[in-house]
Amino acid sequence: MASWPVPPQPPVPPPAPGGRFPGPPARPTVLGLHARQWMVVAILLGVCFSALSGGALTVAWAALTRPPTNAELQRAADAEVARRWRTWPAGRIFPERLAYALPGGRTEYAARVGVLPDTSCAGAADDQVGEVLRRHGCRAALRATYTDQLQGVVVTVGVVAFPDAWKADAALKEMPPSSAPDADRPVPVTPALHAVAFPGTASARFTDAARQQRFAGRAGPYVVLTAAGQADGRPAAAVTKRRPGSPFALAPQLAEEVARPLATRPLPDCAAKKEWQC
């Protein structure tokens, strides 16, 4: 009977000390964790990151869709007021007619004869005043000229825009004092706002030499200056008698009429999407 050769068998390793044969080789580990354990860790981290991302998106969405706070509304109102010199048309800043009161309570109306297109700060006033404007961050100086109802008095009104109310207030404190409206004689009106004359109008003869009164006030981030004189162009030095009836008392009133709407702080209306972005 034929016999088939038996293939050689691998040698049996000797038993380990203590009489036990060695078990299967140990699985490799990284930082003490096997591959399957690392898979579980990766899944848990993914779940955590997904939860954090979802929470962050929820918070961001809530921040984007929440209504503005009162402080945010106030800041938006301040910003809107500060840029009106640039966004409002000249006719809105300087209306065609401005009311002023006379002694005895009678009301008359000053008429605008022209608006100067130049908005530079440097040429708006005499050097001493111009230096104050520059030092405190003047952004623009807008000027227009009015005559009283009888066209005997001419007033140039200047609106000087600053970055904020604090800078405007600091500039105002360094302005020369305003003229007393009922003074016996005109006080010196240099330095002051430069006079602006418009040919063919009652202001045609109004020059710097004719300035007999000056005024300075503030409203929000704006300083409002005026320079007033007589329509015939006579200089202050030529006035030797008391001026009856305080003819230049209208100048501060015109400044106030210009400044009040310009500096009014409305709260933003988020429903008016054409004017506000909330």
Image (spheres, rainbow, N blue to C red):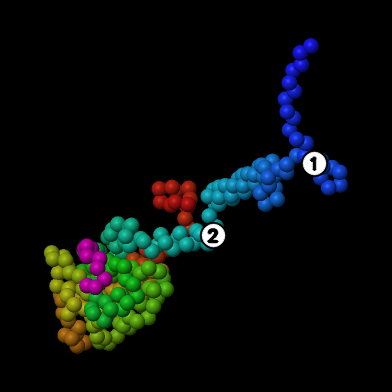
Choose mark 2 or mark 1, whichever is in front: 1
Q: Is residue 125 visible?
A: yes
Q: Is residue 40 visible?
A: no
Q: Dividing the picture into quarters, in which one does residue 37 lie? A: top right
Q: Earlier in the sequence, mark 2 or mark 1?
A: 1
* Left or right, residue 21 beside residue 152: right
Question: Which mark identifies residue 70?
Answer: 2
User: Magenta stretch: dominant SS?
Assistant: loop
Name the one closer to the observer, 115 or 131: 131
* Left or right, residue 254 beside residue 21: left
Name the one closer to the observer, 72 or 17: 17
How far across and down, in percent of the image, does residue 164 sit? 40, 69
Amino acid marked by disc 2: Asn
Find the magenta span and give its range: 114-123
The answer to whether 23 is drawn above or below residue 244 in the figure is above
Furthest-front residue in this view: 1
* Quarter the N terminus occupies: top right
Gap between marks 2 and 1 measured at Cα? 85 Å
How far across and down, in percent of the image, does residue 80 sit? 41, 59
Q: Residue at x 55, y 50 (%)?
A: 60
Q: Does the magenta portion include 118?
A: yes
Q: Secondary structure at mark 2?
A: helix
Q: Residue at x 69, y 41 (%)?
A: 36
Tell me the crowding category of disc 1: few under 14, some 14 to 19, or many 20 or more residues within 10 angstroms, Cα based. few
Amino acid marked by disc 1: Pro
Q: Does the magenta portion include 194?
A: no
Furthest-top residue in this view: 1
Q: Residue at x 31, y 83 (%)?
A: 176
Pointer 1: what residue? 14
Q: Residue at x 20, y 70 (%)?
A: 196
How far across and down, in percent of the image, does residue 186 sit? 25, 85
